[in-house]
Image (cartoon, rainbow, N blue to C red):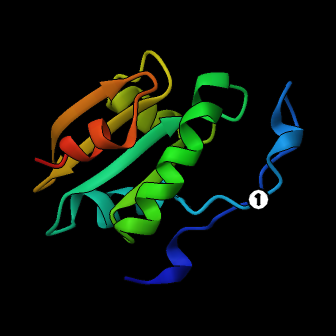
Amino acid sequence: MDEQRFHTPPRKRSGFDSHHRDQMSKVNVLVESDFDEIVLGSDQPVMVDFSADWCRPCKALEPIMDSLAEDIPHKVFKVDIDDCVTLTNKYKIMSVPTVIVFKNGQIHKRFVGVTNKEALLKLFE
């Protein structure tokens, strides 16, 4: 997988509690132009966290997604709904965070809201 096709931006210092989290996210951020190849074209299940910088529940989910990204590299990604409006509409993202696991180019399972690591891992089953 080409490491140049996604990026891990530094956390922004906006919002009420973001100043307590100065570390870098471990989840690779996808852009729309690479989504089909990296997610839909994958021969393995891929988890995508649709989220937004302004979303407090998304911020609460970040450490859990970071932990998953460490445990299962190249299978956990993030899409910023404000930057990827076409994907947001295509997958009918109505609330954030929304986590979708894709298998064989199709939606396998979807979860909306904040949960624990174990529940997210079960989405791969």
In the visual, does 48 lie left or right of 119? Answer: right
The residue at the far top in this view is 94
Task: Answer with left or right where residue 91 lies relative to residue 58.
Answer: left
Image position of 94 with respect to 27: above or below: above
Name the residue located 77 percent from the left edge and 51 percent from the top edge: 11
**Residue tagged 1:** 23
Q: Position of residue 6 (x, y in %)?
A: 54, 68
> In this rendering, does residue 30 appear at all?
no
Residue furthest to the bottom in view is: 2
**Helix or strand or loop: what does disc 1 sit on?**
loop
For label 1, the crowd category at 10 Å Cα-Cα, with few meaning under 14, some 14 to 19 and many 20 or more, is few
Query: Label 1 sits on what residue type?
Result: Gln
Q: How many marks?
A: 1
Residue 121 pos. (x, y %): 26, 47
Viewer-side residue, 107 vs 68 = 68
Q: Nearer the viewer, residue 56 or 28?
A: 56
Q: Residue at x 59, y 24 (%)?
A: 57
> What residue lies at 30% left-to-right and 42% top-to-bottom?
118
- Name the spot of residue 63 as percent of width and height, x first: 58, 47
Residue 117 is left or right of residue 62, and the answer is: left
The quadrant in which the N terminus is found is bottom left
On the image, which quarter does residue 91 sit in?
A: top left
**Residue 93's x, y, as percent?**
40, 23
One can see residue 114 in this view: yes
Q: Judge whether 95 appears above or below 24 on screen.
A: above
Whether residue 116 sits left or right of residue 119 in the image: it is right
Residue for point 25% across, 30% down = 110
Q: Is 1 above or below relative to 97? A: below
